[in-house]
Image: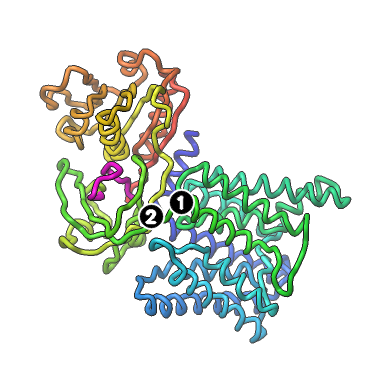
Amino acid sequence: MIVLDRIRGALGRLPMARLVLLVLAGIAAVAVVASVPHWIGYPTAGLVASLVVALVVSRLAAALVGAIARTPVHGTSSLITGLILFLLMYPSTRPIDLLLLAAAALVAAASKYLVTVGGRHVLNPAAAGVFVVGLTGLSGGVWWVANPVLLPIVAVAGLATAIRVGAALPAVVLVAVGAALETAASAVQGAEALPALAAALTSTPLVFLAGFMFTEPVTLPPRTVQRVLVAVVVAVLLAVPYVLPFRVLTFGPSPELAVLVGNVVALLLARPAAAQLRFLERRPLTASATEYAFRPDRPLRHLAGQYLELQLPHRGADRRGIRRTLTIVSPPGDPALRVAVRTREPMSTFKQALDVLPVGSPVRAVTVSGAFTLPADRRLPLLLVASGIGITPFISQLQAERAAVAAGAPARDVLLVDRVPTGEDVPYRDVLEASGVRVLIVCPDPEVLGPVPDHWHVTRRFDAAALAGVLPDPSARHAYLSGSPGFVARARGVLRAAGVRRIRTDVFAGY
């Protein structure tokens, strides 16, 4: 798990869209190069022609449909759609094939910007484009990316994408269930089990679909259990052609149809949460952290501990782009939506734009998601551990808990550990004091803290010995760990040494 935290943190230094664009471009490049010695059974000229058409038309179609819908266009996203279409549809130099590829790109753009519910697009654009073109009977998805030559890079890149999204478990479930069902269906028809399993993994859409289409963040539901459910639904639908092949005119089971049905199921589970926001105010929390408040144009449902993806278009955006995932600090039901970020130099262009944003300016909450939420069973003892701005999910949760107790709910047994750089840099100290929970402050200069409540403890070091003095029942605790990748990896070791066994993490990779 420590290795996984470090991988997630390293991947988190790249914006999600840029990471996916880079790995898909890498897969496309490998495919073109591998076609030269005929390791891939498609002509190089057809691959190059299809790649150019897919990218150019996807970008132009997004600009056109975005203008019609009066919606900001995310250029990187349109290029991702183009690359996926390139990897799914038959690569050719024939004008009719290129025209159908262009039509799929246009449908994909239309589905993204016109088929929306609650401000978020519903369908995976590439899957929608391939499915609609397939209904013509003239072309469709051949999913040529599913071949043994590309499998290693597809598997590694797909797993990296799933880890970055926070959907590694559901993606693995999709592959495992899909492979098992396809293997069983082939075995029933007389195939040997091991060759059938190898074929399911190397020559079907399963691995690519799980890594790059199922994991599209906007079309995923927010909770892990919901994502696993959608993964199972998609896996079952992928196995239908092996169990019950049928076709009504040009309609029949297909991988792209499985993705689209999964998107609809995810929509029903997620209840869309995208919204337009108006900037209300900013306030300094400490010398190096600032809180920003927004008012949504409609009530924005979220759970304490979840995050939103904030889209802030600005000129001269750096390589990290115009979107960030930010933990929601305000508790559910608060009319204002608040987030907090570190604002020390050097700042990204996103932070710079946020720091000078005029009051009343519109920004967009693309989606609300996240599974870093407290357990429903209020009897479970909790250990909340944060470093720096990693305190934000706990601030939302503590405020929500205070309201729940005031409404008659039993109080939880909570110990919060907050590691801060100095005694003067304790974000949301007022909320921590008002919460009434036990707090262990870890800072190098405790004398600077000044007077603290009787139920607070202070230490200079964060180690198992410090925890032992305030945590008599570590093995019973459910720990929640939030902070930078380095802190999360180190803190996990400290908690293990102290006897804590149940640990969930939320990595703040920086932006």
Percent coordinates x, y for residue 62 in the rendering:
44, 75
Q: Is residue 333 magenta?
A: yes
Image position, residue 161 (x, y; %): 51, 52
Image point (45%, 48%), residue name: 222
Residue at mark 2: 273
At label 2, which amino acid type do we have?
Ala
Which quadrant holds residue 93? Answer: bottom right
Q: Which residues are magenta?
A: 326-337
Measured Cα–Cα span from mark 1 to mark 2 = 8 Å
- What secondary structure is marked by label 1? helix
Which residue is at 14% across, 26% downward? 449
At a point 79% along the width and 50% down the height, the residue shown is 185
- Asked if residue 465 lies left or right of residue 246, the reply is left
Q: Residue furthest bottom?
A: 95
User: In the rendering, at what x and y percent does residue 169 appear?
Assistant: 55, 42
Mark 1 in CB contact with mark 2 (< 8 angstroms): yes
Residue 270 badge: 1
Q: Residues within 10 Å of mark 1 (few under 14, many from 20)?
A: some
